[in-house]
């Protein structure tokens, strides 16, 4: 299998952590890919018109899109427990992950607004609104002990990627001081090899 990725992508990191935890990382070839707003990449667009990371290309040549769907595919392949099979825990995990993905999307848009959009054209109120979505999402998880202290699953993996991306791209945002329970959770997660190995490089 091949996984398109960038070391900076929190979405690709999510899949890498899952693959390591499921014992599948050695069966996956990591294929670097570059995607950026306003920059053409016709080769990658032929793989996915959305031009987003990551994409998993199976041994049969099938293309699987979206980090959650890829994790679900790998989890099924390995007979893992990263996504609950049924019942209330499954829908809770999927809902938590939807919130996490929305937070990551908002953080990525803040990054693009600041670093990619030309000076004079930046929309501060729009950027502030998106950052507030991520920030209040952190506040919600700060008060979710079932996630912070629960079994290692897709919710914890996604939350690790949110906090790691905050460190990577928004190092001065102060999330650790504002959310001490998230800080303790993150420090504990860094003890897992899959999490430690996949930390983004220094910005």
Image (spheres, rainbow, N blue to C red):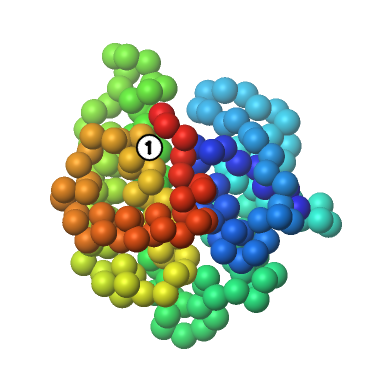
Of all residues, the one furthest to the left in this rendering is: 178
The residue at 19%/56% (across/down) is 180
> Number of labelled discs?
1
Q: Which residue is drawn at 19% across and 54% down?
A: 179
- From the top left corner, tell me how far across and down residue 140 is, in percent: 24, 62
Q: In which quarter of the image is the C terminus?
A: top left
Front residue (pair 17, 124)? 17
Q: In this view, does 110 lie to the left or right of 181?
A: right
27 versus 32 height, above or below: below
Indicate the position of residue 191 as horizontal and vertical percent values.
Answer: 41, 58
Residue 99: x and y, percent?
37, 59
- x and y, in percent, of residue 168 in the image: 37, 37
| Of 53 and 48, the residue lying toward us | 53
Report crowding for label 1: few under 14, some 14 to 19, many 20 or more residues within 10 A (C-alpha): some
The image quadrant that residue 62 belongs to is bottom right
- Residue 147 sits in quarter: bottom left
Q: Which residue is drawn at 41% across and 63% down?
A: 156
Q: Mark 1 points at which residue?
A: 168
Which residue in the rendered view is the most extreme toward the bottom? 87
* Label 1 residue SS: helix
Image position of 44 (left or right of 188): right
At horizontal 37% and vertical 50% (from top left) the residue drawn is 162
Whether residue 22 is visible to the viewer of this picture, yes or no, is yes
Whether residue 101 is visible to the viewer of this picture, yes or no, is no
Left or right of 123, for residue 179 = left
Q: Is residue 174 above or below residue 160?
A: above
């Amino acid at each position: 299998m091949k996984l398109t990725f960038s070391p900076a992508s929190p979405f690709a990191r999510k899949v890498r952590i899952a693959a390591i935890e499921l014992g599948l990382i050695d069966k996956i070839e990591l294929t670097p890919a570059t995607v950026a707003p306003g920059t053409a990449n016709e080769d990658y667009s032929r793989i996915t018109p959305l031009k987003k990371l990551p994409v998993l290309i199976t041994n049969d040549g099938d293309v699987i899109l979206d980090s959650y769907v890829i994790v679900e595919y790998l989890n099924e392949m390995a007979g893992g427990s990263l996504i609950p099979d049924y019942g209330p825990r499954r829908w809770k995990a999927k809902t938590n992950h939807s919130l996490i993905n929305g937070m990551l999307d908002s953080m990525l848009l803040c990054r693009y607004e600041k670093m990619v959009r030309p000076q004079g054209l930046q929309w501060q109120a729009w950027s502030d609104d998106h950052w507030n979505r991520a920030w209040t999402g952190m506040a919600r998880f700060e008060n979710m002990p079932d996630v912070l202290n629960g079994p290692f699953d897709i919710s914890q993996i996604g939350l690790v990627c949110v906090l790691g991306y905050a460190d990577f791209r928004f190092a001065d945002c102060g999330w650790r001081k504002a959310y001490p329970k998230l800080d303790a959770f993150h420090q504990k997660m860094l003890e897992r090899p899959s999490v430690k190995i996949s930390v983004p490089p220094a910005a």
